[in-house]
Amino acid sequence: MARRTKGKDVNGILLLDKPLGISSNAALQKVRYLFNAKKAGHTGSLDPLASGVLPVCFGEASKVTSYLLDSDKRYICTLQLGQTTTTGDKEGDILQSRDVDSFDKPKIEAILERFRGEIEQIPPMHSALKHNGQPLYKLARQGIEIKRKTRQVTIHELILADYTEDTLTLDIKCSKGTYIRTLAEDIGEALGCGAHLSMLRRTEVAPFDCKHIHTLEDIERLSKENKLSDVLLPIDSALPNLPKLILTDAEATRIKNGLKVSKTKLPDASLLRLYMTNGDFIGIGRRAAENQLAAKRLMRTN
């Protein structure tokens, strides 16, 4: 007999405000329990040290997570100057302490300018990147260091929000794959005193409007009030950059049955958002030929 899956069919996206001190997976499991959801996953993991926006995808929304992994992110962070650590953040052991020279704003801005635009980074050992199937952070805990390839990332914005004698607070908008700990360390080296990350909060994940994100306390309260559906975003909110295409009922039926649809004047894009005439989101379609449409990823919500 097949094992029965516990929980309800929940479909949609929650913008969770992950708290400090717990892993992204621990936060996910708490949310999944409160929603009593069969299936849930998150995109763009945050370390226990970090807080902020963590998109949680329930049910069929898991089919769009790969599109979110490529999105730009925004962070506010604080650099502790004068100390480097084994992990690049305050949880690590101190490797070196150095004197911090006095800096004025023009000098700091001149250093920050070097890190705007396209830059190269070496991923830290304390990261989830894998070497022969093993996460680097597990190897790092064993004292093993692996040579890592440099990667190119883009720092769209790097704003000096505040500074003291031994701290910098930065507002950063960056591309996927950017390691803020590495950026903090590199800026510290450029300043000549070293640095590590003492605070990190993710404030935005594209393409969402992240002005309203929800804490675990919010979710617990709404669960008691039976209002959890109020905080779920529709699945297609993750795909605003894909052109929208409305199908007739007959076309929608063919697509759902795995058949191609002949359609003139298809938008000039490789992937499309597909809708029924009543506005229901069907899923993602692809151009199979000049005037041919085929299914790429369909939603089983209707």
Image: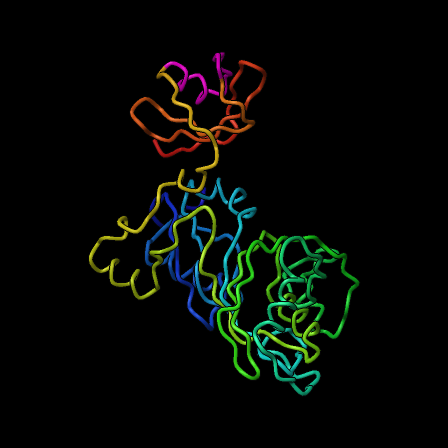
Q: Give the range drawn in magenta.
A: 250-265
Image colouring: rainbow
Provide residue 210's location: percent of width, then percent of height: 39, 54
Residue 34 location, x and y as percent? 33, 58
Vertical side of 1 occupied by 72: above or below: below
Q: Nearer the viewer, residue 154 or 144?
A: 154
**Can residue 272 be seen?**
yes
Assess whether residue 59 is covered by the magenta stretch.
no
Residue 12: x %, y % from top left: 37, 44
Question: Magenta span has 263?
Answer: yes
Q: Quadrant of the N terminus?
A: top left
Q: In which quarter of the image is residue 121?
A: bottom right
Against 85, residue 77 (above or below) is above
Q: In which quarter of the image is the C terminus?
A: top left
- In the image as oriented, which residue stretches furthest toward the front? 106
Residue at 48% from the left image edge and 12% from the top image edge: 264
**Dividing the picture into quarters, in which one does residue 179 lie?**
bottom right
The one nearer the camera, 141 or 271, is 271
In-image side of 264 versus 192 (left or right):
left
The residue lying at 57 percent from left, 55 percent from top is 174
